[in-house]
Each structure stands twice: as C-alpha cells, then as structure tokens.
Image: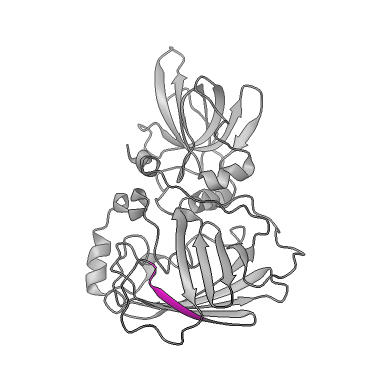
Amino acid sequence: MNKYLASRGIVLLALVIFSSAASAHHSRANFAFDQLVDLEGVITDYSYRNPHIYLTIDVADDEGTVEEWLLEANAVSTLRKVGWSQDSFAVGDQVMVQVNPDRDPSKRLVFVDNITKADGSTLMSSGMPPGGIAGAEAEGVPTNGFNGVWQPDFASRDIAAGFRPVNLPFTAAAQAIRDNYNQNDDPALDCEPESLPSTILPVFPVRFSVVQDSQVHIWYEEFDGFRLIDLSLDEHPAHIEPTLMGHSIGKLEGNVLEIDTIGFSETVWGLGRGAQSGEQKHITERYELSEDGTKMSVEYWFEDPEYLTERQSITGEMLLKPGYDFEAWICDADAARRHLN
C-alpha cells in the first residue's frame, strides 16, 4: 500500500455483508472489507450509472507524484436513497474518501465506504442493503395483498439468494462446467438479467402486481427482469418457446400464491454463479402472506435433471417496502465491466 494511504485497520463485518449484497453480479472478494484507508484527491471523472457508480480521483503523494485511483461504489438504485444524484460530484471537486482497498496492493481500485466533500457533507456507499436503507419499514402498514415491493431482510440474513451454487448436487457434466468457470464470464457483466431460481429471493427489491385476478406480474429491479404468471391455466401449453424466465402458471387463494414454471432455455449460470441450467429445469414456488400483510414467507423447489442429481428445497422471507420508488435499472455495459480494466 502506498505510504499516502493511512490504514485504519477497522473490522467491518456488517459492511462485508451489505457491500457484498449490493452487487449480485460480480464478486467483491478482491476488496479487503476488514480495512479502511483514507484518500484525498481531485475528482477527474464521475459516472452515475447502474450497475455501479464509479469515480476517478487524482491523488498526490508526499513527493507530489500524482496517481489516478478508480473508486467503485454501490448501484444507483441503492445510493439515490441516501442522497446520491447525477449532480453529487463534478470534475475538479476536492474530496476526502474512506475506502476498502484491493487485496492486491499494486492495484489502485478501491470500494467506497464514504466520501466527504469540501463543504463538509458526507455521502455513504457501504452499510446498507441493495435498494436503500434497512429498517422496520413495514411496521403498521395495512395489508394490500401481494401487491407491493418486497425484499429479504438483510439485517438478519446472509446474501445468497437462498442457496450457494457451490453446495448444489451437480451431475458430472455440471461439475465440469463449474470447475472451469471464470467469474469474468458472468452474463450480468453484459447486462443480462438472471434466471430463476437466483431471482426468487432477490438481492434488489421486487414488485408483485395482481392484474384482474388473472395474472401476477413480477418485476425485478436489478436488470429489469420480468415474469408473467398466468392464473387462468391449470396446465402448461403443449408447446412452449423456451425463454430465460420460462413459462409460469399459478394459483392465488387468499394469502397463498403458488407458481409452477417450466419452459426454460439453456442458460449460462442459470443455477447461480458458474452453474449451467438446461431446458429440463422445473421450479415450483409458494408464497404466503402474514396476517398483517407486511411479511411474505417463501418456499421453492427446483430440479434440473441434466445438471442436478437431486431436487432442491429452499425457504426464506421477504418484507414489504411501502413507498419504495421502483425504477428502471437501465444497465450500462461499460459500467458493468469497468472494474475489470
């Protein structure tokens, strides 16, 4: 680490969880989240785009040598909730930054914890779940059925979307793919949305809408994923054109929603990081609302005979986020891959 970085050596376990959660599509294992270091410099670029906000700053050491540092921050959809905007910074601004350094001290790529501007105002990037500030947002809110925006409670659970691919019972064919995967081949780095089951307990907020009691629409904020659940059918059609999200039929009775999905296309990383999925993938889901309508228990099962030796069962919970301003993701391909350069 260069001598003008004053290592703080602070253990930030909670931030490890939240910061990792804020980026579902690429690993942040390269950052040392158990350390904070200080940087002071002048902003040379500010990119306010999903899936990550980036800044570059020029930092001078004691001898006056100037080096450019790349600062990665969380997503626009997360940071706009805590005051970030397109106009938060401008080229030429002097800033003080606390960051998590790369584990490779030769790299000048860091993850932003907080930035203090010349006027003394500070903007945070770490310490919050994707989609905004955590808290008892749903307390006392009257029930409105399944309609609304939902998200797992990141204050009390790890971020694994309900399962970790490394723990899945892979077939030999799937394990061979898994053994040779490269995290830089993540489809999300090309702004492609995730398939099921990774999206069922989502990282970013998800919106449920019941349409005239005949359909349920499910919108995923991250990468603008969308599903249509047909409540009018008891069986899937005989011929289905395979798609990323498959073909879903469902049954809605009172506070219980059940969904059955087939018709998936062969999908790279369709079972999570580095795990292929095939056209035989089959997923069933069960959602049950609490009496006050502020919590939703989730249970789902998935199988894929080509790539899994056993059917899997996962349980979890989502909380209502009343008043959440759900927005289009609008992924920028350059921002998605910028950390690789």
Q: Residue at the far front: name it.
A: 212
For the C terminus, the image quarter is top left
Outermost residue to the top: 63
- Rendering coords of residue 314 (x, y %): 48, 75
Query: With respect to residue 295, does 180 lie above or below?
Result: above
**Residue 3 occupies quadrant:** top left
Tell me residue 242's x, y (percent).
31, 71
Give the color scheme: rainbow, by chain, secondary structure or one colour.
one colour
Q: In this view, does 65 lie to the left or right of 297?
A: left
Q: In which quarter of the image is the N terminus?
A: top left
What percent of the width, then of the height, locates residue 91?
Answer: 49, 22
Q: Does the magenta stretch include residue 35?
A: no
- What residue is shown at x 33% (from left), y 54% (from top)? 187
For residue 78, say whether it is visible: yes
Could you tell me residue 336's position as x and y percent? 38, 44
- Seen at 68% across and 59% down, the residue is 322
Decide whether residue 246 is among the magenta residues. yes
Displayed quadrant of residue 301: bottom left
Q: How many marks?
A: 0
Q: Main secondary structure of the magenta part?
A: strand
Say if 238 sits above or below 3 in the image. Answer: below
**Vertical order, 294 against 34 (above or below):** below
In the image shown, does 215 or 321 lie closer to the viewer?
Answer: 215
Residue at the bottom extreme? 234
Q: Note whether residue 1 is visible.
A: no
Q: Give the range drawn in magenta.
A: 245-250
138 or 42, which lies in front? 138
